[in-house]
Amino acid sequence: MRSPAFLLLIALAAAPASAQESPAAASAVPIPPGQVAMAVGRIDGLVADVMARTGVPGMAVAVVQDGAVLLAKGYGLREVDKPEPVDAATVFQLASVSKSVAATVVAAQVAAGKVAWDTPMTTLLPGFALSDPMATAMVTVGDLFAHRSGLPDHAADPLEDLGYDRDAVIERLRLLPLDGFRDKYAYTNFGLTAAAEGVAAAAGTDWETLSEVSIYTPLGMGHTSSRFADYMAEANRAIPHMRSDTAWAPLAQRDPDAESPAGGVSSTVEDMAKWMTMVLGRDGVAGAPLIPAAALLPALTPQAVSSPPEAAAERPGFYGYGFNVGVTSAGRTTASHSGAFYLGAATCFYLVPSADLGIVVLSNAQPMGAVEAVAIAFTELAQTGTVSEDWLALLEPFFAHMSAPQGKLAGAEPPAAPAPAAPDADYAGTYASAYYGAAEVAAPDGAGLVLTLGPARVAFPLEHWTGDTFVLTPRGENAPDGSRSAVTFVRESGKVVAMTVEYLDENGLGTFRR
C-alpha cells in the first residue's frame, strides 16, 4: 500500500506557544492553561464521529505531554461481529509508523558508536549494490532512511507480494533504474530495510533482536515486536479489516516480515506512549536519556524535501530519517508519520516538540484518513482551541485515490469482437526475468491458462482479452480491489518468445523471456 505519510504534512491552522530558548523556535500563538486538557476531553467525541462516519471497527489513542500519559484508551472492537473490545493494551500492526521506530533503533546505535548516519552501506553490507556504481559507493544509512538514494518510489514492493524474502529483495535492488542520486525524494520500504539490515550487521545481531534490546526492553514496551509471529501470538490482538462493498470484514492478514524495519512493528498505544515520551526527550532510563539528543536530532530534522511547494506562499514538507518533518502555520516544527496496510491497518502519530506533546492513533481498518483526522483535529484543538476543517472529509478523497484500481484495463469493457487467441500450447512454457525470477504459464486440465510467479508460486488465472493479450487480477498489499493487469505475449517470427506483465512493469522490468 502506498503510504499516506505525506498527508500528515498538511499545515495546521495554529500552534501553542511556550518559553523558547531560540528565536528560530519562537511561536506567536500562546497555548492557554487548560487548553490541552480540553483537547484531551474532546477525543472521545472525535473518535466517535470518525468511527460513525467510516464504520472503522476499532481504534486506540494515546496522548502524552511533559512526560505524562494524559490518555490511553481503546474504542470499538478487535474484530467485527465478536465481543472483544479494543483497549489500551490491544496490539496493532503499525505499518509504516515502523519507519520512525526503526530510526530510533538506528539512533541508539549511533549513540553507541556502532554506526553513523553517514556510514556508507558498502562498509556494512559488502554485497550491497545499486545499479549505478558511483551511487553504490556513496549511498549511506541516512540516504536510505531519508528516501534520497535514487531508488524509484516503492522500489521492489511487488517482490514481497510474490514471496521473496528480505535478503532476496535487497539483492535485487541493484537491478532497479535510479533517478538522480540525492536529487529526489522517493519513498521506499526496501531501501530503508536495507539500511536497517546494515545497522544490525554492525551491531552483530539481527534487526528484530536489535530493536528489542535497544528500544523495546529498556522502555518497558512489553507488547511491542518487530516479528510477525509475536503479533500473531498476542491474545489481545486487533484483526485487520478491509471494506467490502459497505461492510468491514477480516479478509486478509498481512505478514510484513520481509520489510520489518519499514513496516513490521506491532505495538499498543500504551507502549507507543512510552516511545513518544522518549522521542520528546522525557524518558529517563537509569537517570539518563535512552538516546542522547545529538544522535536522534538528525532523524527529527529535514534531510530531504518530500513535498515541494506548488506556490510561493506554501510551506514545504520535509523528511528526516524515518520521520516526516513539517512546520505549522504558527511556525512550530512537527514530527509525524502515517502507516497503511491496504489489507487492513491504518496508524499515525503526531509530535509537537515545542509543546512537549504527542498523539498516536491506531486502527484495524483499511486506510481512509480516519486516524489522521483524529490526530490532526486533536492537535489543532490543543494549539488553538478550535478545529479548522472537517479533516475526514478533506482526507477521504486522497485515500480513495490511493486505493483506486490499477491497470489500463481496470474498469474497461472487453472488446466487442476480440481477435482470437492462439492455442494454449503457443503460450504455455517457462519464462524468466532477472528481477522477478521464473514464471510458468500452463493450462492445467485444459481449463484455461494460469500464470504462476515467485517463490510463493502465486497463481493468476489468465482471461483472454484480444489476440495475444490476456488479463490477470493482481492481489495482495499492492493491488487494490478492481485492479486488472494486461499480460501481452510477444512474438518473433510468429513464435511467442516473451510476455510483459503490466502490473510488474512500472520500472520497465516486467518482461519475461521464454
Image (cartoon, rainbow, N blue to C red):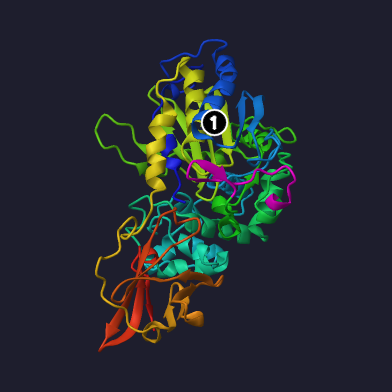
Q: Give the vertical position of 186 relative to 35 (above or below).
A: below
Residue 488 location (% of width, % of height): 32, 73
Image quarter for residue 56?
A: top right
Horizontal side of residue 27 vs 469, given as left or right? right
- The outermost residue toward the front is 416
Q: Residue at x 53, y 24 (%)?
A: 46
> Which residue is at the front of the view, 429 or 338?
429
> Which residue is at the front of the view, 332 or 239?
239
Residue 15 location (% of width, % of height): 45, 21
Please identify the quadrant where the C terminus is shown: bottom left
Instruction: Classify 10 Å Cα crowding around label 1: few (below 14), some (14-19), many (20 and above).
Output: some
Residue 73 location (% of width, % of height): 66, 29
The magenta-colored residue range is 231-250
Is residue 127 visible in the rendered image? The answer is: no
Label 1 sits on a secondary structure element that is helix
Q: Give the vertical position of 454 relative to 307 (above or below).
A: below
Residue to which mark 1 is pinned: 51
